[in-house]
């Protein structure tokens, strides 16, 4: 349930493993949008698709392991999903500007420890030439050769195509309620949809982000999540001579991603605003890069803007990957990293389903 990136990726992966998969989401009534725009978006269609796995600060724990697994899976996922009708590529590298000497020192140590993973610290990064030099906090930068981004809309199209080609079924409807089937019934779970169809299935995988809690609460599973809004700007550079020569696929400055696209455009994002109401002061702080914006960025014209909601688990770390009871699996609450973690989450769900078939649980 849920055809954002997590649900669609999981559906494709399960169908590759040989399972009969039905994917439900009202958003399947329309094609994946060509570009993100002002209209209401789920987390995935609002996302910037940044994959920051190797440059992650921690070196242990579940978050690190999930990132490592995803980063190992991404190249083969992209090559299997890339198709003439839904082209897909990984765009690398990613550079993070240090905001202070302290942060620069942490980055140096990280680069030292992870040389084999393509990390380097640049004390004096060779700045791309005018008219679009990088912002200059002046403390060096961490370059991660294998991190970068994937186009989230292209990814959604590629996943839908591959899932369909694999024999998966998509239905544009909302799952309204889940019921445990009685003993001896075919299928362990009944899914009541907005169309009124009661569907009988062996397993339910809930990938409905903010819509997940209300599906599992009546079954006795309390997993509250809060919305965290994110805004993105699409900027057009003032100078027709602008070029993105020597720019990485993603440049991060003070937590803001600068992503060049086209000849003269740049996505800038994303704000982190608890709640569902957008606040223009966050956009102002982002556009000025907290006073670090170079003149060309200040002068850039805003030609597009959008927002989306992330699902953040309350009182538990993101994401929520839990086998709640036999045949009821939660893969949700991916908060700020659902694109990055989609392959690892899908693998985890596949393992849960396969092991429950083996053990008959
Ligand atoms: C502005 C912004 C920028 C971001 N940038 C990045 C980034 O650079 N890198 C990164 O990794 N992550 C990023 N994220 C986070 C990422 O987008 C999310 O973590 C990810 O999209 C979550 O995917 P999802 O499939 O779980 O949820 P969603 O994409 O929100 O999809 C959930 C789907 O569930 C459906 N649904 C809900 N209830 C039901 C129901 N009852 N029945 C059926 N369907 C239901 C909804 O219609 C929806 O389509 C960003 C998020 C935002 C908002």
Image (tube, rainbow, N blue to C red):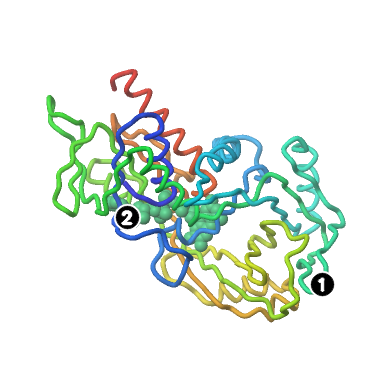
Local SS, label 1: loop
How far across and how far down the image is residue 206, in percent? 33, 43
Q: How many marks?
A: 2
Q: Residue at x 75, y 50 (%)?
A: 143
Compared with 276, 26 (above or below) is above
In this figure, which residue is indicated by the disc labeled 2? 28
Report whether the residue tagged 2 is closer than 8 Å to ligand 1: no
Q: Residues within 10 Å of mark 1 (few under 14, many from 20)?
A: few
Q: Residue at x 67, y 74 (%)?
A: 288
Q: Which of the numbered marks, if any, corresponds to residue 145?
A: none
Q: Residue at x 68, y 44 (%)?
A: 146
How far across and how far down the image is residue 150, in percent? 57, 52
Q: Does 115 sit left or right of 234 as displayed?
A: right
The numbered mark, 2 or 1, whose residue comes first in the sequence reads 2
The answer to whether residue 326 of the structure is visible from this angle is: yes
Q: Nearer the viewer, residue 32 or 197?
A: 32
How far across and how far down the image is residue 323, in percent? 36, 33
Q: Residues within 10 Å of mark 2 (few under 14, many from 20)?
A: some
Extreme residue toward the front, this view: 84
Q: Residue at x 18, y 35 (%)?
A: 180
Q: CA distance from mark 2 to mark 1?
A: 44 Å
Q: Does 101 sit left or right of 273 as displayed?
A: right
Q: Nearer the viewer, residue 278 or 148?
A: 148
Ligand 1 is located in which of the four quadrants? bottom left
In this figure, which residue is indicated by the disc labeled 1? 130
How far across and how far down the image is residue 310, in percent? 45, 57
Report whether the residue tagged 1 is closer than 8 Å to ligand 1: no
Circles 2 and 1: CB atoms closer than 8 Å: no
| Location of residue 221 by image quarter | top left
The answer to whether residue 314 of the structure is visible from this angle is: no
């Amino acid at each position: 349930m849920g055809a954002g990136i997590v649900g669609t990726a999981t559906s494709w992966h399960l169908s590759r493993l040989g399972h009969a998969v039905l994917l439900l989401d009202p958003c399947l009534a329309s094609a994946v949008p060509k570009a993100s725009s002002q209209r209401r978006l789920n987390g995935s269609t609002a996302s910037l698709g940044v994959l920051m796995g190797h440059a992650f600060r921690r070196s242990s724990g579940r978050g690190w392991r999930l990132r490592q697994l995803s980063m190992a899976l991404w190249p083969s996922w992209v090559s299997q999903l890339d198709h003439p009708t839904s082209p897909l590529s990984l765009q690398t590298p990613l550079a993070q500007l240090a905001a202070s000497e302290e942060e620069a020192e942490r980055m140096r140590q990280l680069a030292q420890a992870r040389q084999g993973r393509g990390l380097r610290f640049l004390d004096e990064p060779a700045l791309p030439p005018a008219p679009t030099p990088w912002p200059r906090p002046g403390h060096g930068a961490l370059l991660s050769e294998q991190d970068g981004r994937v186009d989230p809309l292209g990814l959604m199209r590629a996943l839908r195509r591959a899932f369909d080609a694999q024999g998966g079924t998509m239905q544009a409807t909302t799952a309204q309620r889940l019921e445990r089937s009685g003993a001896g019934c075919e299928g362990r779970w009944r899914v009541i949809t907005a169309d009124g169809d009661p569907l009988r299935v062996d397993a339910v995988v809930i990938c409905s982000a903010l819509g997940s809690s209300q599906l599992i609460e009546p079954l006795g599973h309390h997993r509250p999540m809060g919305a965290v809004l994110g805004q993105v700007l699409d900027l057009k550079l003032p100078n027709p001579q602008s070029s993105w020569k020597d720019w990485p696929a993603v440049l991060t400055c003070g937590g803001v991603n600068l992503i060049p696209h086209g000849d003269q455009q740049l996505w800038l994002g994303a704000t982190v605003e608890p709640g569902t109401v957008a606040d223009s002061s966050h956009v102002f702080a982002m556009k000025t890069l907290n006073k670090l914006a170079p003149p060309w960025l200040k002068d850039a014209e805003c030609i597009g803007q959008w927002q989306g909601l992330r699902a953040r688990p309350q009182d538990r770390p993101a994401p929520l990957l839990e086998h709640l009871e036999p045949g009821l699996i939660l893969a949700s609450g991916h908060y700020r990293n659902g694109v990055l973690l989609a392959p690892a989450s899908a693998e985890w769900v596949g393992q849960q389903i396969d092991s429950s078939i083996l053990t008959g649980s």
